[in-house]
Image: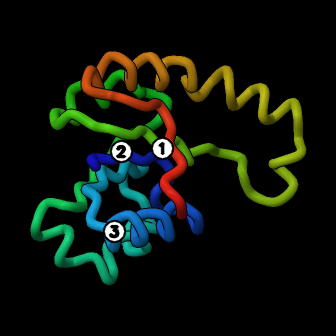
Amino acid sequence: MNIIMTGSTSFVGAATVRELLRRGHTVTAIVRPKSSKLDTILEGNEEALLSGRLLVIENDLSEPERLLEKVTKPQDVFCHFGWGGSGSASRTDKALQRSLWRRSGQRRLWDAANSCFQALRRSMECIGI
């Protein structure tokens, strides 16, 4: 399957990328521009990167519409793990989380995913990880 994923450099995201690649899937990893954690998905996945099974696209999630320009291959699954303010005390700060939801373009991200992936069969899928 072709799987696109936000939050791919996070602890859970990087582990998910490794497992998906191990199972033979193609992963398009959406990462923050100039991400300092890019090595979490590149290290150990050099073969997948060279063979085109791991694609890395820089895109700020506050501009989800730009994914339409950058992702040209049809995707089967959209995994959205990217979320600012997910660390420690920020997770329970309701005002911060509401603010992030409004500012981050989560609805626009969903709309972009639906527009971009006409071959999308599922918006999210648990694949037994």
Residue 20 vertical position relative to residue 7 in the rendered view, above or below: below
In terms of secondary structure, where does tag 3 sit? loop
- Closer to the observer: label 3 or label 2? 3
| Label 3 to label 1: alpha-carbon separation | 16 Å
Residue 98 vertical position relative to residue 78 in the rendered view, above or below: above
Residue 128 vertical position relative to residue 2 in the rendered view, above or below: below
Any mark on residue 79, and which? 1
Q: Could you say which is closer to the camera, residue 127 or residue 62?
A: 127
The type of residue carrying mark 2 is Ile
Q: Are marks 3 and 2 in contact (CB under 8 Å)?
A: no
| Label 1 to label 2: alpha-carbon separation | 6 Å
In terms of secondary structure, where does tag 1 sit? strand
- Pinpoint residue 121: horizontal percent, then vertical percent: 36, 29
Any mark on residue 4, and which? 2
**Dot 3, crowdedness within 10 Å: few (<14), some or many (≥20)?**
few
- Pinpoint residue 90: horizontal percent, then vertical percent: 82, 49
Any mark on residue 23, and which? 3
The type of residue carrying mark 3 is Arg
Residue at 36% x, 22% y is 65
Q: Earlier in the sequence, mark 3 or mark 1?
A: 3
Q: Are marks 1 and 2 in contact (CB under 8 Å)?
A: yes
Residue 85 vertical position relative to residue 20 in the rendered view, above or below: above
Residue at 46% x, 57% y is 8
Residue at 47% x, 35% y is 61
The type of residue carrying mark 1 is Cys
| Label 3 to label 2: alpha-carbon separation | 15 Å
- Closer to the observer: label 3 or label 1? 3
Q: Earlier in the sequence, mark 3 or mark 2?
A: 2
Q: Earlier in the sequence, mark 1 or mark 2?
A: 2
To which quarter of the image does residue 73 belong? top left
